[in-house]
Structure formats: structure tokens, C-alpha cells
Amino acid sequence: MALSRRVLLGRLATAGAAGAALATGAGPAQAADPAHGGGRRVHTGFDRLSAGGYRLLEGRTVGIVTNPTGVTRDLRHIVDVMHADERVRLTAVFGPEHGFRGTAQAGGSEGRYDDPATGLPVYDTYNKSGRALADIFGASGVDTVVFDIQDVGARFYTYIWTLYDCMVAAALAGKRFVVLDRPNPVTGRSATGPVLDKAYASFIGREPIAQAHGMTVTELALLFNGEFVPQAAGRPVKLETVPMTGWRRTDFFDATGLPWVPPSPNMPTPDTALVYSGTCLFEGTNLSEGRGTTRPFELLGADGIDRRWAAAATGLGLPGVHFREAYFAPTFSKFQGKTIGGVQLHVHDRETFDPVRTGIGLLVTAKRVWSGFAWRPDNGIDRLTGSSTVRKMIDAGAGTDEIVAAWRQNLARFRALRKPYLRYA
């Protein structure tokens, strides 16, 4: 009997994923991947879900929260792959900030529309939470919500709070929730940075976790469901997770053999992710954080800054990073079209580089060498750091090490809290 095009495409997709899984066995994958530098092959949660014939979704009406990072190893979008497979009843897509297909800039989304490629309804989750988001899940008609988005490891990157909001909403709506894991691109070795004070909660930090959390989305989902979702929804969500194989906590993204798809327009490379949890703090100042350049979050500057900033930052002796005097003209965002001075970060030793401590050191030195330094009028820096402590200490003239020491006690508590939820060696 002739197979339909949809069934054929689905079986080919699953056969490819299953072949990769069988080649590496059931344990952590170690097979060489010539297309990506010969490193170990990491199999994502979706790889394992599809290799298993989507048994976890059997008999379910499925909606998926995803964006352009939800891809297979050969860069096909998982929505297209699942839609082509009759074993999955995929009936809805939910888009986060920047949108499902990634057409929106920071602080934007794509709204409600029907996806031209699949015909599936796409619902907008951005800036929606609680009962309003639960109502969207209810209206969509799904009974299972799947989450698959590449995170970058920073508390203020909004996709993890889309995860949290969707878990709370799914609990309120009585929906099942499935998280497909992907790597933390900057490793999961340890958490670092200040922990959010709940009084400063916002969409860039709903719950008290560290600024660089050192967890994968599956681990965060387990933590959220164990510690926070029951408080917000009155009960935990019905949660299932599909972990990766082949990933170790010490792995940077280039060790995974996976292709990098920018999770947002200003996260073009894994190098951006490496510095982001520290240099994104400059969004809370009147300096450019490099948006509108080819090196966002690696280039920082403002009109009137000169070589003295790079010299002062170098004088801190921060490990793993060099600071180069740099001049650039952003094409959009702060100082659009104007040539400004500042620094470019060059990370030369990823193992010793501490992005959060580096970001604090850059704030401290910028304020000391540039008389024009100012915080954003809404004190957005407090939401980024998770409290007013960093801002007040810098204003009082505190040094980098003194500021870092101020969060150590809360950080130690968070590290202990997260430990039971870690799933990778």
C-alpha cells in the first residue's frame, strides 16, 4: 500500500534520529561527528523522543512552545518534522518573545496567526501568564504542552520564564507538560552571581535563582516544579522530561556536535552566550551593550568613553579575558549611527572566565572613568541583578571583589537548593 507523503516524511525523520541513537547505544553518546569537528554526539530531548517513536505523546493532542532553535541536527524545524508524522497529533504552536519563527526583535512577538508552512495555529505567549495563559492553552484544545527552546544560561533571558509561566498555566488548566532538553551552552559546572530577591520579580526573573544558573531547561523545570510552581498554581504541573544523552556539565556548546541557531536576534553565536550573563547588565545603564553591532554584548561603549576604560578594566586582573579599546557605530538601539568608544571583551580562557564578576568589574570601572555614566531612569539594573544591592554598592564606591562577596551567602543557598535537581554528571 502506498504511503502518504506525511507518513513517509515522518518515518524518514524518525529513522534518521533512531539510527543516530542506535549508533551510540543507550548510555552517554561518544560517537564521532565529522560534520562538527569530530566531537561527541549529544542527542537532544527531541532526538530521543523521535527515536522512541513519540511514544510519550501517543494518543495525545499536542501543542508545542518553541522558536527557531527547535531544530534537528540537520536543521529541520521540529514542528515541520512532527507535523509530517501521523504518529503525532500536533495541533497548536505557542510562540515566545521574538516569535515562533523568530521575526521579532527584543521586547516583541509575532502575535496570533496561522503558520504558512504547516497551517497550524500559532498562539502568542509573550507577556502572558497565569490564568490568561491557561485560557490560551484551554482554547487551543491541547491536552499536552511540549517545551523545546535553546536557553543560554542567564536568569534574565526570558525563555526560562516562558517555561515557568507555561508550567504554571498548564497546572491551572490541568494540562500535561513535557520538557525536551537541550544543552546549557556555557556549561552547567556551577551557579554564580546574585540571587533574585522576590521583591524584584519580573519577566526577566520570576523566582529566586542565580544570575548564571548553570542548569539545563529540564533541570530548571524540575526545580520550578519542586519549589515554585505549587506556590503559584496551588499544585505542581503534571511534568515529564526527556533528558539528553552525551552531554556533560563541563561541556561548552562547541563540544556537543549540535548546530547553533541564534535563540534571539542579538545572540548570534555561543561566544555571545558566554559573556551575556555578565555584560547584559549594561542594559541597565546609558551605555550601549552592543546591540546594533555584529558583536552584541561583547562590544560595550558610549559617546565620550576612550582608552581609559579598557586600561582600567585590564587593571582589575580578571581571569580569562582581555579588554581591547574599541570604537563602533551601532546600527540601531542606543547611539544609533553614532561612532562611540568603549571596550571589546576577548575571552581567552573559558575555564577561568567568570562572566558575572567580569560584568560587575566593567560597571565599576565604567563609572570611575566616565563622568557621563548613569543608570537607566527606571533602575532596570535592579531587575537585572535581582535587587538594589549592586547598584547601591557601585554608587557608594565599592570594588568588584566587595560586591561579589555580598552575594556569596545567598548563592551558596541556591547551589544547595538546585543540587537535587541536577541530572547530568
Image (cartoon, grey):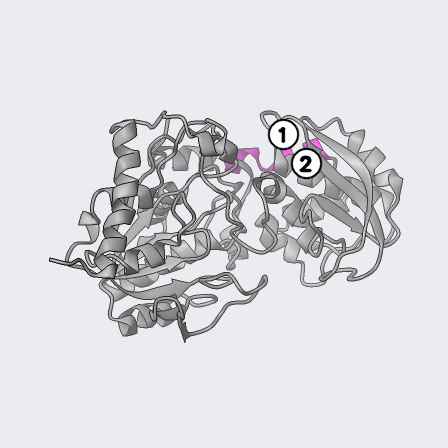
**Considering the numbered disc 1 on the image, is that residue within a helix, a strand or a loop?**
loop
First in sequence, mark 1 or 2: give its number.
1
| Among the 4 quarters of the image, the one containing residue 59 | bottom left
The span from disc 1 to disc 2 (Cα, nearest Å) is 8 Å
Relative placement, left or right, of 249 versus 398 is: left
Residue 186 pos. (x, y %): 52, 36
Query: In the picture, which quadrant includes the N terminus?
Result: bottom left
Q: Nearer the viewer, residue 376 or 411?
A: 376
**Amino acid type at image mark 1:** Phe
Decide if residue 121 is on the left or right side of residue 50: right
- Label 2 sits on what residue type? Thr
Q: Is residue 407 magenta?
A: yes
Q: Is residue 87 visible?
A: yes
- The C terminus sits in image quarter: top left
Q: Residue at x 49, y 40 (%)?
A: 213
Q: Residue at coordinates 42% horizontally, 74% vertically from top-left?
A: 112
Mark 1–mark 2 CB contact (< 8 Å)? yes
| Structural crowding at the residue carrying mark 1, measured as other residues with C-alpha within 10 Å and reported as few (<14), some (14–19) or many (≥20) | some
Quarter-of-image position of residue 42:
top left
Position above or below: 306 against 140: above
Residue annotated with mark 2: 358
Helix, strand, or loop for circle 2?
Answer: helix
| Image location (x, y in percent) of residue 287 | 76, 53
Question: Residue at the location (26% across, 66% down)?
Answer: 173
Q: x and y percent of residue 253 in the render?
A: 50, 35
Q: Quadrant of residue 226?
A: top left
Is residue 358 part of the magenta span, yes or no? no
Could you classify mark 2 by the number of other residues whose Cα lies within 10 Å: few (under 14), some (14-19), or many (20 or more)?
many
- Provide the residue span drawn in magenta: 400-411
Between 245 and 278, the one lying in front of the other is 245
Picture disc at residue 353: 1
Front residue of this view, candidates 312 and 273: 273
